[in-house]
Image: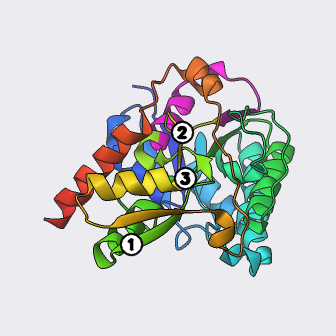
Amino acid sequence: MPEKRIIAVSGANGQLGMALKEISPLYKDYDFVFTDVAGLDISKKEALEVFFTQYKPAFFINCAAYTAVDKAEEQEELARLLNGIAPGYIAETCQKHQCRLLHVSTDYVFDGTYYRPYPEQHQLSPNSAYGRSKLLGEQNVLTYCEDVIIVRTSWLYSTTGHNFVKTMRKYGAERDMLKVVFDQVGTPTYAPDLAKALLALVQKSEEIEGAGIYHFSNEGVCSWYDFAKEIIELSGIECIISPVETKDYPLPANRPHFSVLNKEKIKNDTGIEIPYWKDSLKECLRILDENEK
């Protein structure tokens, strides 16, 4: 039997890393190595070299990131290090060890003023520290690795970690009313769906030559208000969701007002069927309810 190829995953304790860990037993043609900051500091070149020499991965999925969007306004250097500079180090190491890199990026690299689903080649102009740090990461991985796939996603949530779904359920159960912005429109992404898409790209990687950029989110479109209302109603929580404009709910970081991603390319190249956002939300809530029993 031929030796199984190894897929290494950084940021393994985050939402996406945990989702990949959950579904990894289904992908029997590969061996997986999951690592987080305790096992691999991606901001240190020497640590990456040791890791690659030890495990010899054929694929490296970089899920590690600084994701505190508002804090990044104060901690831009830290965001730049983890989201921008460290991915460059990973890319250099992948290039040296002939490893295919899959790097996860974000809708925040766009300014949110296009108002049509964003294609991969659309002009990049982030308007937040977080977005700038993620753009730097994209630029660095493309500069230092010939064999890189960037996957941009939006509004990630899951049954683990901190996310909008869990926050709405928590505060909805505690309060009579929640104010949620209705003038920011995009698409939620259920982490297990994104995890499957990443592994579909791994499986099709022989057919994808050189560097590539893909977009992935669930299907459909909604505002944060619509998303919150659906979460509360499906959870059976009695709480009024009140729509407000972004200007009435100021936060340190600018958010894209429109960040729907065009997913034709990933569907054409992998053949995957992408679930509708409400269907994936129902699945997430089912698991959360089961876990709370």
Residue type (three-letter) at the residue carrying disc 3: Trp
Q: Position of residue 154 (x, y in %)?
A: 59, 49
Upstream in the sequence, badge 2 or badge 1?
Answer: 1
196 magenta-colored: yes
Q: Which badge, 1 or 3, is on the more N-terminal residue?
A: 3
Q: Quadrant of residue 261?
A: top right
Q: Quadrant of the N terminus?
A: top left
Residue 161 seen from this side: yes
Residue 179 position in % (x across, y down): 49, 69
Residue found at x 45% / y 24%: 273
Pointer 2 residue: 221
Q: Quadrant of the C terminus?
A: bottom left
Q: Are marks 2 and 3 in contact (CB under 8 Å)?
A: no
* Residue 13 shows in this picture: no
Side of 201 where 177 appears, left or right: left
Residue occupied by mark 1 = 177
What is the span of residues highlighted in magenta in the rendered image? 194-214
Name which residue lies at 51% across and 42% down. 6
Image-based side of 183 in relation to 18, left or right: right
131 left or right of 57 in image: right
